[in-house]
Image (tube, coloured by chain):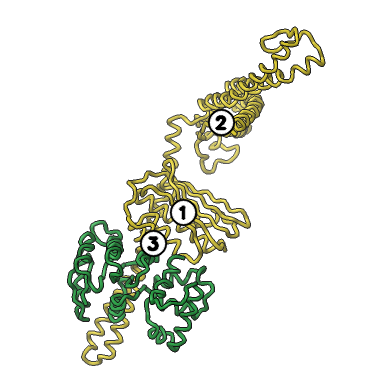
Chain colours: A yellow, B green
């Protein structure tokens, strides 16, 4: 089993080496095109259009290299600045955006050394195992063709049969070395790529700031909208009902002596109004922060939620502690929204919620057996989840092919506090 | 009848005491926090305890936990739990020892004094008093109830709230005989063999709490 995965990784890396070497050659073409574009900058009309166009190609090539590096286990973030608004192809803005981005020049600087290193390491990754294969297949070839100037490994040229026989173990050795070394060579190439193509510290911070600015604006918007909704609900609902309650009781007070029967009717009415006001307040509280979430944390809240929905929902939880309150709340509402979507749109017969914590990441998965076709770019609910999670650097991915099933995967980086102390969570 | 009361808000505690005493209950102790509740329940062994779910010092579900712990030590100790919100999850935990004498109501229900007092008496007598909101949430779920007719569901709902056959007959405008026929059908459909055990009513409720 282990040997097989070692051989598979090795073979895959050999293939990767061939790809790397091949792609390295395109670097040289890109250098030539980029040089032409740079020289042509002073030419009116052409210059402003050509360089951004060439750089788009270069960036695509660099992105490809980043993806290959990710496959070799080295993650490299994209360092580019976001495209400014109204940056038309051939326009000045677009030209300035490309030229002033330091990442552009680092990309260009990488093309030649990247080609040299990629070519060398890629070819090495392919050549050593190939040489091993040659050693293994040498014996029949040598016997058959009986060439005498040819050799292998330590024997050059091969002069007798024992030497020819010994080329077989040597070939096996070379093949083993080649297959072991190929993934390492790809890794070295990826590390070299990272020197040029990863964002600098400054660029990384700038990207982070840009991202935080967006998520903060979203969070503030969402909070403000939420406050407005609460204010409106209180004003139109509970507050109005309490006013009418006061009036009804006041009237009953007046009627107590003159018409006790009417007073009694009014008091019954008053009691009903007070119940409705309480109901509204309760729903409002639930929308802000469900009491069961405060009392039992994510575990109890999600179980209670699953019980209250008109569909069988399997809940699987593995949480060694509780996240910070805001994160917990975001996680709960994300699951609640996802489940609400299932109930509303999926036509599913059953659903499943799985919540796990591992490696500093809270993973929430909501899946159903419905008809699929959910699209985050259209559903406001899914967009809402995305925004809610983004405030905590969380992510959401949706897999929902037509015909189903739909799987919503959400991840939230967080730390858990001390283990839960609730004595009864497994009474059922 | 002797009552132990647990409620942290003084306004509500005094109101409840006054209300219970107006109906000739004797409030032997009224506590305002979680840790004091369990010893009070064990010491007085009241005919019924009226307990708020959320109590100091943690303001989580201390009242519920104390009630469950007390019933662990004094089996069947009648407890009526009051809450600002109701969750089937909590109802299930309360009923999980399969004894009667349990109630779980929204605080709103207190305002309908007659019904509230009726619920307290029912719980004291070893019956159940589930909040209609819990019951309706349960009835909205499908699976274990799929085989029941609409009328049987109605009867089950009333039964889950804790009403007697006579009371159910009066609410649904049918004869008591019809009610007991429906109830027998329900027991059969939910897979509960006939027995004299009155707790089958509790078990029926528990069946869907566990569903």
Chain on which label 1 sits: A
The residue indicated by pointer 3 is A287
Depth check, front residue: A4 or A42? A4
Q: Is mark 1 on a helix, strand or loop?
A: strand
Residue A184 in percent (x, y) is at 56, 25
Packing grade of label 1 (10 A; few <14, some 14-19, many >=20) is some
Residue at the spot 31% in from the left edge and 67% down from the top edge: B84
Residue at the spot 29% in from the left edge and 65% down from the top edge: B71
The residue indicated by pointer 2 is A72
Q: Check if mark 2's residue and mark 3's residue have beta carbons within 8 Å.
A: no
Chain on which label 3 sits: A
Above or below for A127 versus A46: above
Which numbered dot is residue A316?
1
As measured in the structure, the alpha-carbon distance from the residue carrying label 1 to the one carrying label 3 is: 24 Å
Depth check, front residue: A427 or A157? A427
> Mark 1 or mark 2, which has the lower sequence index?
2
> Image quadrant for the N terminus of chain B?
bottom left
Q: Check if mark 1's residue and mark 3's residue have beta carbons within 8 Å.
A: no
Depth check, front residue: B168 or A416? B168
Residue B30 in percent (x, y) is at 19, 68
> Mark 2 or mark 3, which has the lower sequence index?
2
Residue B3 occupies which quadrant of the picture? Answer: bottom left
Chain on which label 2 sits: A
Residue at the spot 52% in from the left edge and 28% down from the top edge: A194
């Amino acid at each position: 089993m282990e040997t097989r995965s070692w051989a598979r990784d090795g073979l895959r890396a050999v293939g990767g080496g061939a790809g790397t070497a091949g792609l390295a050659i395109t670097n040289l073409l890109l250098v030539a095109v980029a040089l032409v574009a740079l020289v042509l900058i002073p030419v009116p009309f052409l210059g402003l259009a050509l360089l951004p166009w060439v750089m788009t190609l270069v960036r695509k090539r660099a992105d490809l290299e980043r993806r290959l590096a990710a496959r070799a286990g080295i993650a490299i973030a994209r360092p580019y600045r976001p495209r400014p608004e109204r940056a038309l192809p051939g326009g000045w803005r677009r030209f300035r955006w490309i030229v002033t981005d330091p990442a552009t020049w680092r990309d260009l600087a990488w093309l030649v050394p990247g080609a040299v290193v990629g070519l060398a390491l890629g070819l090495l990754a392919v050549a050593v195992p190939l040489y091993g294969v040659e050693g293994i297949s040498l014996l029949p070839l040598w016997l058959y063709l009986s060439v005498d100037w040819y050799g292998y490994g330590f024997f050059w040229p091969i002069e007798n049969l024992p030497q020819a026989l010994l080329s077989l173990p040597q070939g096996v050795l070379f093949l083993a070395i080649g297959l072991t070394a190929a993934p390492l060579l790809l890794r070295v190439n990826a590390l070299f790529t990272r020197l040029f193509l990863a964002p600098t510290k400054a660029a990384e911070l700038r990207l982070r700031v840009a991202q935080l600015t967006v998520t903060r604006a979203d969070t503030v918007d969402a909070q403000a909208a939420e406050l407005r909704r609460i204010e409106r609900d209180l004003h139109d609902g509970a507050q109005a009902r309490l006013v009418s309650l006061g009036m009804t009781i006041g009237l009953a007070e007046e009627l107590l002596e003159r018409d006790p029967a009417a007073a009694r009717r009014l008091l019954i009415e008053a009691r009903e109004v007070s119940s409705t006001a309480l109901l509204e307040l309760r729903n409002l509280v639930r929308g802000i922060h469900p009491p069961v979430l405060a009392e039992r944390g994510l575990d109890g809240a999600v179980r209670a939620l699953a019980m209250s929905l008109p569909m069988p929902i399997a809940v699987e939880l593995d949480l060694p502690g509780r996240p910070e309150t805001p994160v917990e709340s975001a996680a709960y509402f994300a699951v609640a929204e996802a489940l609400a979507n299932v109930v509303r749109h999926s036509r599913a017969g059953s659903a499943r919620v799985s919540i796990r914590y591992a490696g500093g990441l809270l993973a929430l998965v909501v899946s159903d057996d419905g008809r699929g076709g959910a699209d985050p770019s259209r559903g406001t609910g899914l967009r809402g989840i995305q925004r809610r999670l983004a405030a905590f650097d969380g992510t959401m991915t949706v897999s929902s092919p037509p015909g189903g099933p739909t799987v919503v995967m959400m991840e939230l980086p967080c730390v858990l506090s001390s283990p839960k102390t609730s004595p009864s969570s497994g009474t059922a | 009848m002797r009552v132990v009361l647990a409620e942290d808000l003084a306004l509500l505690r005094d109101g409840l005491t006054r209300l219970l005493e107006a109906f000739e209950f004797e409030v032997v102790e009224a506590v305002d926090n979680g840790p004091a509740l369990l010893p009070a329940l064990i010491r007085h062994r009241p005919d019924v305890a009226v307990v708020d779910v959320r109590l100091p010092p943690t303001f989580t579900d201390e009242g519920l936990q104390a009630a469950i712990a007390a019933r662990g030590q004094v089996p069947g100790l009648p407890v009526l739990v009051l809450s600002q919100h109701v969750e089937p999850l909590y109802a299930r935990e309360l009923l999980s020892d399969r004894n009667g004498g349990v109630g779980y109501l929204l605080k709103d229900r207190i305002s309908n004094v007659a019904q509230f007092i009726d619920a307290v008496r029912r719980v004291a007598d070893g019956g159940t008093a589930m909040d209609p909101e819990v019951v309706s949430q349960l009835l909205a779920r499908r699976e274990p109830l799929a085989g029941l007719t609409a009328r049987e569901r109605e009867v089950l709902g009333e039964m889950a709230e804790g009403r007697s056959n006579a009371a159910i007959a009066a609410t649904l405008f049918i004869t008591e005989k019809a009610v007991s026929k429906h109830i027998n059908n329900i027991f059969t459909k939910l897979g509960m063999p006939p027995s004299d055990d009155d707790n089958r009513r509790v078990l029926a409720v528990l069946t869907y709490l566990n569903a």
